[in-house]
Image: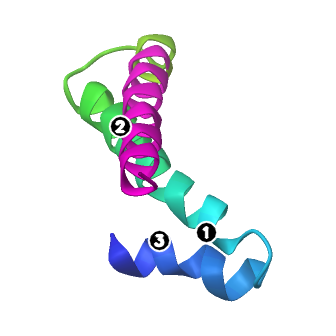
Amino acid sequence: MAFLASIPVVLIGDSNEVQAATVVPGVIVGIAGYFRARAEGRSKAQSLILGGIVMALGLTVTAVKNFLVGH
């Protein structure tokens, strides 16, 4: 996870690297949710919906953590 979160830092540069790096964990969790749903035999549509829900939850957790760290 740390390696994948550091990729935007290297590719994007100084200006928006922190914002990009905070999104990566939520996206990874969403992708994992999609593949988990597919492994359980769900359809692609159901898997995309579940992956999207899991990604939204992951991004929400990331946003709350970033907000709390700033205070």
Q: Position of residue 17 (x, y in %)?
A: 67, 73
Residue 61 shows which numbered tag?
A: 2
**What colouring method underlies this structural image?**
rainbow
Q: Earlier in the sequence, mark 2 or mark 3?
A: 3
Looking at the rendering, the stretch of residues picked out in magenta corresponds to: 49-71
**In the rendered view, does 28 fall on the left or right side of 40?**
right
Q: Quadrant of residue 51?
A: top left
Residue drawn where x is 38% and y is 27% of the image: 57
Residue drawn where x is 49% and y is 24% of the image: 52
**In the rendered view, does 23 fall on the left or right side of 40?**
right
Q: Is residue 60 above or below residue 14?
A: above
- Residue at the disc numbered 1: 18
- Amino acid on which disc 1 is placed: Val
Judged from the image, the secondary structure of the residue bearing numbered disc 1 is helix
Judged from the image, the secondary structure of the residue bearing numbered disc 3 is helix
- Residue at the disc numbered 3: 5
Name the one closer to the observer, 22 or 66: 66
Q: Residues within 10 Å of mark 3 (few under 14, many from 20)?
A: some
**In the rendered view, does 10 fall on the left or right side of 5?**
right
